[in-house]
Amino acid sequence: MLPLSSIQTRGALSSLMCVMSCALLHSGLASRLKSPILPIQSEREPLTSKGMSGCSFGGRFYSLEDTWHPDLGEPFGVMHCVKCYCETQRGRKGKVLGKVSCKNVKRDCPEPSCDAPVLLPGQCCKTCPKGDADRKQVEAMFDGFEYFQEKEKEDDLHKTYNDRSYLSSEDISPGESRTDFVAVLTGVTDSWLPSSSGVARARFSLTRTSLTFSITYQRIGRPSRVVFLDSDGNTAFEYKTPKGDSDMICGVWKNLPQSHVRQLQAEQLRVTMTTATGRREVIEGKIIKHRALFAETFSSTLTSEEEHSGMGGIAMLTLSDTENNLHFVLILQGLIQHRERDSPLVPIQVRLQYRQHVLREIHANVTVYDTDFAEVLTDLNSRELFWLSRGQLVITVETEVQDPRHISGFITGRKSCDTIQSVMSSGDALTPGTTGGVGSAFFHLHDNGTLDYQVQLVGVSSEVMGLTIELKPRRRSKRSVLYDLTPEFDRPSGRAAGSWSRLEARHIHMLLQNELFINVATAHSQEGELRGQIRGLLYSGLEAPRHEIPVPLAGQFVAPPVLTSAGGHAWVSVDERCHLHYEIVVAGLSKADDLTVNAHLHGLAEIGELDERSTNHKRLLTGFYGSQAQGVLKDISVELLRHLDRGTAFIQVSTKVNTRGEIRGRVHVPNNCEFRTKGEVELAEFDDLFVRDPEELKKDPHTCFFETQHHAHGSLWTPNYNHCFTCSCQKRTVICDPVICPVLTCSRTIQPDDKCCPMCERKTPKEMKTPERLDEHPEGCYFEGDQKMHAPGSTWHPFVPPFGYIKCALCTCKGATGEVHCEKVTCPALTCSRPVRRSPSDCCKECPEEDNPPLEHADMMQADGTSHCKFGKNFYQNSDNWHPRVPLMGEMKCITCWCDHGVTKCQRKQCPVLTCSNITRREGMCCPECQDSKEEEEEPMKVPEKKNSWRH
């Protein structure tokens, strides 16, 4: 099926009606409009979201105490001046329920202190224009960075030196912020069952509403599940661990409710792990915040050799920035026995050992209720640093009591599920350039200090002369090379693969602190044509193969090639359900303005087909800020899956500067999804659509309840009330669209009784010049979009959930082959000077009504059916237009709706693209404008006032 860029979202009016009804009725279950061409909310059915209480609002589920700004969809957008809240209420039987309440927060805006405040895009309240105060705030972000304080010395740094790769806007952007937590899991000792000797160390990262976790464990079998418990001891989230022999568990808790986020911040959540094979063992621990997580580069898991000990601990370690001092923090659990709790202090001994030799020894006291301990081992010698880098040092903790207990563990580089990777771009080179080339690299650090690497270079301007891992230079002319990868570089393939086995402890520390860089020197740029920072990429939970070298994205691969400073790479995979998983990382797109409030959209990620015989077909993956984009694409066309399998597909990132493509890369993902070209549904989808138990459908929070039946998310069907409609279920929302009949060009048409649209009368075999073998595909063609059979030779507009029927494309069933051929509609040539598009969903423009001849009476009589529209509680006649009203906001003067033969359509006023830096929005105006141009326009307006009048 042909993906089109002109698809308009169909759910805007649905979201608007939901917001209106929810705001008026203060209920998350207010019904939507029942007009068949608008999205229809599922009929009365108890809201199921895995047993969680909350609110349903605008087709989304919100947890108790969540707050949000309602998003009405296009063309209305996000209502920044309206804030909704999911209140907690109790029903008559004591059941906890959610109630939505919304209020206008514009009246709560503070009074600006300046004379000419401006309204920034995406904000509700006016603020003072950015000035010295904003610059001071930005400069304050860099006070803690030694490098930026020294950068201003001209004798220490060349003026053309590029510092962008060392601290980009992504590092300080609020949207990219994360909070780290840690937990020590040991055996439960207050149970009558034997305790476990297992110990696990779990590290968590909270980003927006997702909690990623990396768990390593020792002295316990492979856990079958990881369970998060709330403050009341109830299960908040359960993660089933995949089978394997690794001692690492990687997972993501997505869509974390705000109530659980608050409990996490308050250190009220616990995590448990349970084994399924052999003797059932359970270990658990409390999730806490700790200041040492930010600087941790080495770690150790401390275990006991005793059986059923129920004790353990972790050590978080880091090196000093300038001296060879080893800082460490111990978190101990179960080491203090119950009989020792009578004493306020418990003496312990901490030893640093190499094999059986004690290198350092510390005596200290810990309290019964706070067993954390911090210390610094000063001036490590070269042997100690060498053993530290090889993972051969052991840290031991022992209680100095009558019956001593001890735990110990090896010290290694910090382990996590994150990926160490780097994107090398010409924009991040020491002397920035625009070559359109890119370098891609990823690394794996072993416990013994060996670093495996794979590097790929494409699109460089000349022969590669050097490939090196370096430190951050103080001066452009003094690069600090740590390791030379050039001997391993294969010039014909542009790849380098090998191992760096002599990392020092300081190098491991800098690697895990994102302080190392990889540099590519060429014959034309001997100091470096490409350069990138080596940094950890947070685990995402997607099935993208991060263990393989990613797809390089370069400007040289765009057609025609683009000489850009940007570069990127992408991991792409297709799962057993034929869903596409992707992760994209870009570099060289950062702008200085991103440090201010006016953030810019960095790019639009697309995927498409490379076919020289026809136009490239593209699908939008996502728009993204910052340097990363990731997600899952489910509704993929068979043609695109075939191109992925053959290696003729591409991933492309477009920007404002290069809307046709900034960087691109060819993608080859072998898959077995081509069977769907014959109309067969893959086994996974067959299970979902036909074999699923009705009781399981009821439990699915995305199921739709319509006409007394449950429908799975993504399913399509013909409703009972009218067989000339097609309905689809999109996450608990039913969308029904009328079948749009294509314009026929044949002289004779027929109207089959079982069809909604007329068809061209088929020629008899005698009339056909070249008889077709109709017996090969007598049943016609199966089309995946609407999941229906179509008669041979029939034509129709494709149905694309959730957008409905696409008027800009026309599909034909080839009777001889049974294949579906879709192509873009060719618009007729117009004679008028200013053609218009009657409605946003129309594909072709038309001449205005005054340019068109009046309709004949017979033509007018053909326009049967509903001619009026219902919007909210009002009715409108055909061709009427109005500004919609939204509760709490009033009339939306920047949006115009009109009635088009029973179909309500709305469109926001189109605003011009602004290229200035100072953007403002005046009261009562629909579009933002440049602050500078506004002042220039006001100046000449003062001059003509002296004259009597304007002449037109």
Image: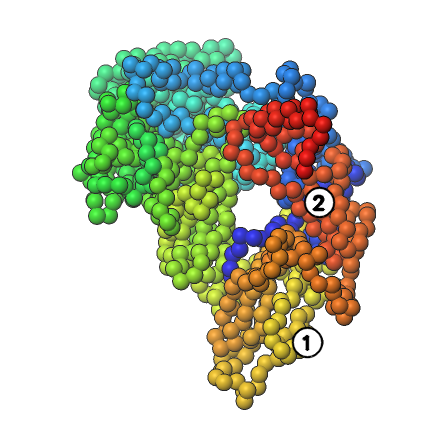
Q: Is residue 802 left or right of residue 863?
A: left
623 or 545, nearer to the observer: 623
Inspect this view and state whether residue 159 appears: yes
**Label 2: few (<14), some (14–19) or many (≥20) C-alpha neighbours in 10 Å:** some
- Name the residue: 26% across, 16% down: 380
**Label 1: few (<14), some (14–19) or many (≥20) C-alpha neighbours in 10 Å:** few
Tag 2: amino acid: Thr
Place of residue 132 in the rendered image (x, y in percent of width and height, measured from the top left): 52, 15
- Quadrant position of residue 537: top left
- Name the residue: 50% across, 67% down: 821
- Name the residue: 24% across, 48% down: 493
Inspect this view and state whether residue 171 appears: no
Q: Of helix, strand and loop, which one carries label 1? A: loop
> Mark 2 or mark 1: which comes first in sequence?
1
777 or 117, nearer to the observer: 117
720 or 159, nearer to the observer: 159
Residue of label 2: 896
Q: Of helix, strand and loop, which one carries label 2? A: strand
Place of residue 249 in the rendered image (x, y in percent of width and height, measured from the top left): 43, 39
Q: Where, quadrant-wise, is the C terminus in this rendering?
A: top right
Residue of label 1: 751
Q: Is residue 303 left or right of residue 922?
A: left
CA distance for labels 2 and 1? 37 Å
Q: How many marks?
A: 2
